Amino acid sequence: MIPKNTICLWYDTDALGAATFYATIFPDSAVGAVHRAPADFPSGKEGDVLTVEFTVLGIPCVGLNGGKAFKQTEAFSFQIATDDQEETDRLWNAIVGNGGAESACGWCKDKWGLNWQITPRVLTDAFTSPDKGVAKRAFEAMMEMRKIDIAKIEAAVRG
């Protein structure tokens, strides 16, 4: 059954490679149907992979090999809630270590240009705390980081 709402992600030519990578690092993720172009199109030929159905942590997605007309931006990102430093490190290192790039405050970009926020739950809990002092200290600590260091967030929470 086709979901009512699906996230469509634009790739130059490697939607299948991206979907396969995501399925290897995120639980509850898989590659589904691969659809090939029925005719030539501006950025490809008949028979090329045109779309790929996949899930990321249970979220239905379609990867579209649309060519170089549009680029990914930070205006869209997947925010992944992690439970501990081990999970944070594993996901961050997988994305960055596979040709991606680090950014600030828990953000990184994969080699296809898609943006990810690898966000420990302890960070979200801290900067959304009703205690404004806790929220401020956690937020200020986060602003100094690339990959989130949970021990430093917890130290900031303690003051």
Image (spheres, grey):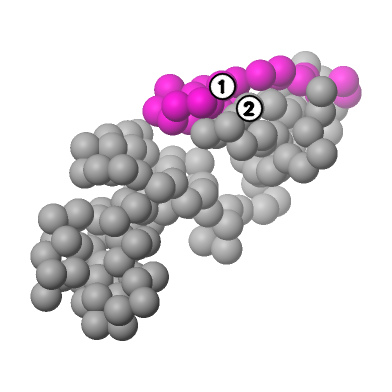
| Sequence-first disc among 2 and 1 | 1
Residue at point 61% right, 37% down? 59
State the residue in front, 151 or 48: 151
Label 2 with label 1: CB-CB less than 8 Å: yes
The stretch in magenta equals 13-39
Locate the N terminus and report the quarter of the image it occupies: top right
Residue at point 58% right, 57% down? 76
* Above-or-below relation of 47 to 136: above
Which residue was labeled with disc 2? Answer: 54
State the residue in front, 100 or 87: 87
Residue at point 50% right, 41% down? 112
Quadrant in the rendering for residue 141: bottom left
Residue at point 21% right, 37% down? 86
User: How many numbered circles does the render carry?
Assistant: 2
Badge number at residue 30: 1
Residue 129 part of the magenta segment: no
Which amino acid does the dot numbered 2 rest on?
Phe
State the separation of the CA atoms marked 2 and 1.
6 Å
Residue 11 location (% of width, % of height) = 62, 40
Residue 120 location (% of width, % of height) = 32, 51
Question: For the residue carrying disc 2, how many other residues have a C-alpha within 10 Å: few (<14), some (14-19), or many (20+)?
Answer: many
